[in-house]
Amino acid sequence: MRVSIVGGGPSGLYLAILLRKTGHEVSVVERNAPDATFGWGVVFSEETLGALRDADYPTYLEITDSFARWTSIDINYRGRVLRSSGHTFSAIRRTHLLAILQRRARSLGASLTFRQEVSPSDVDGELVVAADGANSILRRQFDFGSSSVPQGCKYVWFGTDLVLDAFTFVFKETEHGLFQVHAYPFDEHTSTWIVETTERTWRRAGLDTMSEEDSMAFCQSLFAAELGDRRLMSNKSVWLDFPLVRNEHWHHGNVVLIGDAAHTAHFSIGSGTKLAMEDAIALANALERYPSAVEPALVDYELERQPVVERFQQAAGDSAAYFGRVANYLGLAPIQFAANLLTRSGRISHANLMQRDPKFVRVLDSWFAASATGTPLVPGAVAPPPMFAPFTVGGVTMRNRVVRSVSTPDLPQAARAGTGLVLTGFVAVAEDGRTTPDCPVLDDSWAPVVKEVHDTGALVGVRLGHAGRRGATRATGGADVPLRDGWPLLSASPLPYTPFSAVPAEMTEADMARVRDAFVAAAGRAREAGFDVLELDLADGHLLASFLSPLTNRRDDEYGTEPLRFPLSVVDVVRAAWPGLLVARLTVTDWARGGLSVDQGVAHARALADHGVDLVHVRAGHTTATSRPEYRRGYLTTLSDRVRNEANVPTLVGGYLTTPDEVNTVVAAGRADLCLFDPPPTPLEEVGA
């Protein structure tokens, strides 16, 4: 098969090597010189090295013989350097990698042409491969469903003659804002030194108007303490926005995308070249499986690689977002800041860290236990995992960080399992505030259940709310299916929850007064029943939440211009009536077009804390029936992280946290204080034993 590859970067060259090994006629055309490159060094993981070894052993040997290797991560934070070991990294100078791949491709008979501009009309082959990078010319000629948007902070890519012995992060506070460095060695003489900051800080520092030379001098001065007598070096090192490239389809006819032409992943997880070369391996393998049929091979390649790349892009996006808001974490203790940084993308967990660096985790767990109990930190002390550390807030102490939310009959059983706090499901403050006819209200029957939970040593909380426009629905037969003969509904505005729901009445001042009184009365009954915790429901499209979202609050009075006005009035009267721990279950984002943004949700959390809420239970979506929550394991954790560290309020988070490792990771890193634990049933539970 005649294969034309446009682009002579790692993905194009490596694909040429693999295809020549299987007898294909291959030509590579590159617009730049053979030694032209952006950046300095390339990092590989052990997993990728294994794939390179199996794909082409001679190339693998030459690449690995040139590696700089290290196992540690250094974190420069608040005048301290924290080191975590057990992380295996390998790196190589990018120009050297290109030279190795060029030599190998030529030795196998591939045709390589450099310094030649490529027009799509000039490209001829039974298979045409677009390996021409994030700004692919070939990609623009066809409809791949492409998008390219800026992601993360402003950054500039320098080299330095400071030879590091660890992957190094530096966090430097200035009068302009925070700057951070991602740095790593890639040969015996040189390291990569990437400087990153938010656009606001970049502009405040005047970097938007500086020349390349002045910008490098600024960074040289800024990191003088870390660089010492070593210097920064430029390779057309200008400040950039990272382009996040996505494509709905990776092939069109006989044209296929690989590497950055198909996708990019933010540099902060170091996966760009890794993904590109893995693309080449997958495409070569697909063509070997379908040697005489291009279309099935390209479909096979796409089906294999797209899910892998999407997971990496998700992790890279989480990492990029972390560095965009990292200034919010400067209040964390150094060891917790380090844990937060190391676990930012979700690829490293508490258990992973224990395997890689047991000493680091012992220090982390000891610090966490000491801070939880208010006792002095004892060096070398054995401490329980973070999920088993007690937590004190709002005048009450929970025995651990585990929370379960269950129906009324299951409360004692959940408590006997060792849970620190057991929460009820939705309990209506009034008959017309129920979700379904079976929805409970507070009455005298709760006291014995509360006592039974207390006998196990757990605390128990009640979730009080008013269903609003999500009321009067069937208990079975699907979510939000309205009753034939329901009861009158209330909401911020007369908008039905679904097209088939009853239209609620827009609340009047009299309605608001009646609902406030109902919440106060319910809080009094909760106190009489012996509950330790009261959770106010301001989430999931229910009544109080309907005032907070622009999708559901269309009022033109003060309750429309001040969406917090009525919900805060309820918080105030409940706070006055309830002396214990007060929790707000809060929708932080609607996850719907035109809805509540995360920034607005964080501001709401801050306002609730100012009005006496002790802890925020982070929720998202369900404001409207068309909300599109981004469901995945731990999907609420990042939102909780933002609320906790930006609004400075303790948080409870769920979102499919099903293992102790996930709970340990979340609380140890300071992303939440409590976790709604939802473990899968054990075999004995499944059979009712």
Image (spheres, rainbow, N blue to C red):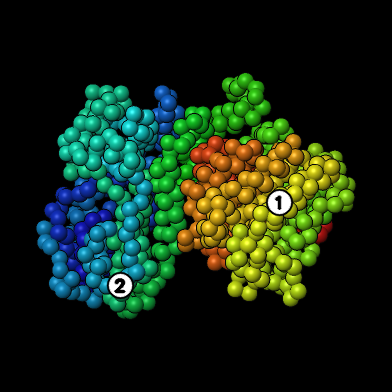
User: Image point 54% across, 43% down: which residue?
Assistant: 643
Q: Residue furthest left?
A: 115
For label 2, the SS is loop
In the image shown, does 99 or 183 lie closer to the viewer? Answer: 183
Please name the residue that numbered disc 1 is placed on. 513
Residue 380 seen in render: yes
1 vs 2, front mark: 1
User: Image point 84% across, 44% down: which residue?
Assistant: 529
Between the residue at mark 1 and the residue at mark 2, the CA separation in whole angstroms equals 57 Å
Picture quadrant where residue 121 is located: bottom left
User: From the viewer's perspective, is residue 498 above or below residue 456?
Assistant: below
Side of 584 where 74 appears, left or right: left
Side of 292 where 483 appears, left or right: right
Tag 1 and tag 2, C-beta contact below 8 Å: no
Which quadrant: the N terminus? bottom left
Please name the residue that numbered disc 2 is placed on. 143
In the image shown, does 323 or 611 lie closer to the viewer? Answer: 611
For label 1, the SS is helix
In the image shown, does 534 or 48 lie closer to the viewer? Answer: 534
User: From the viewer's perspective, is residue 218 above or below residue 37?
Assistant: above
The image shows residue 218 at horizontal and vertical percentages of 23, 31
Disc 2 residue type (three-letter): Asp
The image shows residue 605 at horizontal and vertical percentages of 57, 44
In the image shown, does 345 or 522 lie closer to the viewer? Answer: 522
The numbered dot on residue 218 is: none
The image shows residue 107 at horizontal and vertical percentages of 18, 59
Which quadrant: the C terminus? bottom right
Side of 312 where 409 appears, left or right: right
Q: How many marks?
A: 2
